[in-house]
Amino acid sequence: MPVTRTPVSPLEAIDLLLAEEFSTREGRRIKMALMTARLTQLKTLDTFDFSFQPSLDRNQILTLAQLGFIGRKEVLHFLGPPGTGKTHLAIALGYEAIKQGKSVYLATLAEIITSLTKAEREGSLRQRIQFLTRAALLIIDEVGYLPLEKNGANLFFQLVNAR
């Protein structure tokens, strides 16, 4: 069966090409931002099972996805036992932030303490703290999973204070 095509004006052709170029660039930007943010396992709010956590207010989470808390420089904590979806929600909010052009960085508390301790030892603590404060959204996972030593707690306090 022959395919019939409707003629496209030069302006429509340019518009289609520019839309395709924008889409390609946006896809690359998001992919690179996800890698920079260390969001290797993409999780979205669409894939979160709210029925699994009936005590969670879906509307409140969807309001958080508007990311007003980032602009207000507020801290957001997800508290609960293991396996309740805290990491999923944090990554989903990180993904939303990236889609909106915001910088994101994800690390476990242990990774952050290790990097701060190493930077302190090497005399580059200030630079490391600056790096960790640069992201519009810093996601710290597994807080409370392992106990902190006094120096680690002090370094973490310095980071939180700087943010």
Image: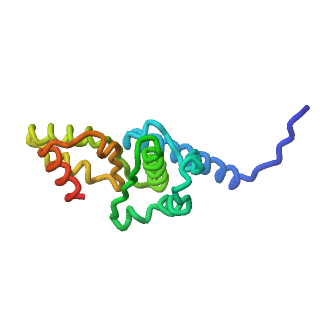
Relative to 110, does residue 8 appear above or below in the rendering? below
Q: Is residue 63 left or right of residue 118?
A: right
The residue lying at 41 percent from left, 55 percent from top is: 102
Q: Residue furthest top?
A: 1
- Would you identify the image quadrant in which residue 58 lies? bottom right
The residue lying at 61 percent from left, 46 percent from top is: 20
Instruction: Report x, y in % for residue 147.
Output: 22, 41
Which quadrant is home to the N terminus?
Answer: top right
Give the image's coloring scheme. Answer: rainbow
Q: Is residue 70 left or right of residue 23?
A: left
Depth check: 3 or 117 in front? Answer: 117
Q: Residue furthest bottom?
A: 72
Q: Is residue 25 left or right of residue 107?
A: right
Depth check: 144 or 34 in front? Answer: 144
Instruction: Report x, y in % for residue 130.
Output: 21, 51
Instruction: Report x, y in % for residue 33.
Output: 42, 44
Which quadrant is home to the C terminus?
Answer: bottom left
The residue lying at 26 percent from left, 39 percent from top is: 146
Depth check: 109 or 18 in front? Answer: 109
Count of marks placed on residues: 0
Depth check: 78 or 123 in front? Answer: 78
Instruction: Report x, y in % for residue 67.
Output: 45, 61
